[in-house]
Amino acid sequence: MDDKKVEQLANLLNRLNQGNITDELRQEALQIVSNIDPVELSLAEQKLIQDGMNPEDLRNLCDVHMEVLSDELDKVKNNIDEGHVIDTLINEHEKLKEFLTNLEDINSAIQLMKSKEENTDIFKRLVETSTLIIDAENHHLREENVLFPELEKRGITGPTRIMRMEHDELRLRKKTLKDAALNVETMDFKEFKSVVDEAAKYIIFNLRDHIYKENHILYPTAIERIEGAEIWKDMKERCDKVGYCSFTPGI
Ligand SMILES: [Fe+2]
Ligand SMILES: [Fe+2]
């Protein structure tokens, strides 16, 4: 995004942050935000933070951004058939979000326990859920090896770099979580609780956020920029080679 657009956004933000958001100003903000490519907008927001803007001050812009983005996922879903590369990825995200809700419940229950003996069933649930979350690996590999390269070929490199980094950070925490789940017997319980709490909270927050960005920004961009049925058919074949997850709906 050119500096002029970033400046325009910063200016808009100043006015939004003065507190008195009239309908007129809101409309103007929506107009400006919807004219900016969602990927560019995310990068601009990131740049404003890097330039020293308090993330809190971005909140008003984020609200407008969210309002614009909320329709994006529906638009994507209405434009693709069942079994399309992106359709499968979106469906897998839905399953992953369920696992994250389960992980949240499991972690809360564990944090309330005083000793391991109180509830041994919960550790089995933790192994099951952390195994399912790790089993998303083929989902991430289809993104990294098939979807992202096609976006990168079309000049969209910033967002895919961020998504790749987030995959790597998440991989580390997922492994930590599963290792702890498998070693509860031998670990000091206090230590176990703190390792699980930290890894679970990281994964829950960051994977939800990651999924949101892909559903509402990256996938809509992919649908828009990767044009032609042939290329999507070819990508589908490459995805089939990478493989799916145990929880992929319809597989
Ligand atoms: Fe991803
Ligand atoms: Fe994803």
Image (tube, rainbow, N blue to C red):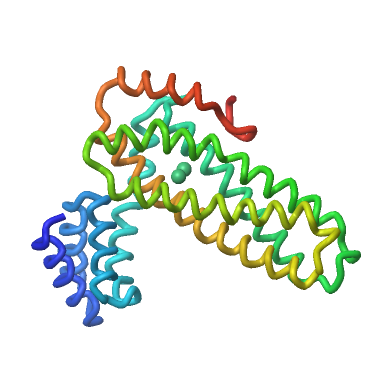
* Identity of the residue drawn at 23% across and 61% down: 44
Q: Quadrant of residue 181?
A: bottom right
**Quick one: 164 or 133, which is closer to the camera?**
164
Q: Quadrant of ligand 1?
A: top left
The correct choice, above or below, for 105 with respect to 189 in the image is above
Q: Does 35 sit left or right of 164 as displayed?
A: left
Residue 80 location, x and y as percent? 37, 29
Residue 164 location, x and y as percent? 41, 47
Q: Does 250 sit left or right of 27 as displayed?
A: right
Residue 65 location, x and y as percent? 29, 59
The correct choice, above or below, for 233 with respect to 109 in the image is above
Q: Quadrant of residue 111?
A: bottom right
* Identity of the residue drawn at 31% across and 37% down: 222
* Identity of the residue drawn at 56% across and 57% down: 203
* Identity of the residue drawn at 35% across and 23% down: 232
**Quick one: 141 or 123, which is closer to the camera?**
141
